Amino acid sequence: MVQFYGFNNKIYNPYLYLSSGGSDLAKPLHTYGPAGRTGYMIHYVSAGKGFFTSNNKKYTLTKGAFFFIEPQKIVTMSADKSDPWTTHWIRFTGKLATEYMKRINIDHTNPIFFITDHHAQIIHDKIFELLETSHMERENDFIYTTKLLQILDQLQIMYPKNLPDEQNSSDKLFTKAMQYIHNNYETPITVNDVVEYMSLDRTYLYKIFKNVIGVGPKEYLTKCRMRKARELLESTDDWINIIAYSCGYSNPLHFSRAFKQFTGLSPSIYRSNNKKVIETKN
């Protein structure tokens, strides 16, 4: 990995310590791990494509994705062959960091979130502010700690650990179910898997989704997969069966039927039409 910028905080703090950060432009197929890290880490993908494995689950990540690393949990990071990713990251440790992370439902089993959330945009901004601050000549540990606290605050707003009296909150349940879908839609999960993970009645889960976003969990799962399928058809030359597997379909024929029902076009025609549009623009 070619690191084009990185910094280390020289002023150690045993309670809440932003130890380092940086920006990395990966070489094709560069891989880190499987290995554990000694601190908490948050990475943001600003360009390209890469693969992140945590808790034995592999995630395909592109621009706009964040991934979280928990201390001593085994992870693997690998850049794509043709479009290696660019990431920006921070690392933090400390007794307070450990206590604060207990309030946040982001860990090695739920490590992914996206910039499409308003609060995630704030996290993005604070990470880049930290990287900019590190260019200052004077020591910046107060600023580092302040911005790190702002990041942790936003994470707690996005993914709070449910208190006992909040277990039946539909908003909390929806967030948990949506995050599970986001983290697993590239595998052949079904709504039944979501129901089992949530320990909810299927009808109740359906009502929660309808009330919050107007569609049921099955339709939402399909939308996630179709969004990914269109992205891959537009940006890669991968075979249709590879794209099907990458979007959680174990049967390419079922994928093609679902894609045509969703878009009105078969995957191959959709790809062909998209390329014609690009050629016309050029």
Image (cartoon, rainbow, N blue to C red):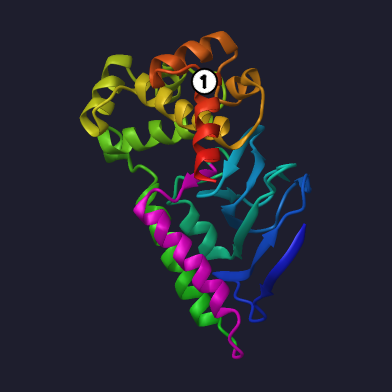
Residue furthest out toward the bottom: 138
x and y percentages locating residue 121 in the rendered image: 41, 58
x and y percentages locating residue 262 in the rendered image: 39, 19
Occupied quadrant, residue 60: top right
Q: Which of 143 and 259 is in front in this view?
A: 259
* Residue 122 part of the magenta-drawn span: yes
Please state which amino acid type lies under the numbered disc 1. Ile
In the figure, is residue 272 to the left or right of 5? left
x and y percentages locating residue 236 in the rendered image: 63, 34
Label 1 crowd bin: few (<14), some (14–19), many (20+), radius 10 Å: few
Residue at the spot x=59%, y=42% of the render?
A: 61
Q: Nearer the viewer, residue 42 or 49?
A: 49
Q: Is mark 1 on a helix, strand or loop?
A: helix
Q: Give the range drawn in magenta.
A: 111-138
Task: Kindly identify which residue carries mark 1.
Answer: 269
Residue 38 visible in the snapshot: yes
* Residue 129 part of the magenta-drawn span: yes
Residue 77 visible in the snapshot: no
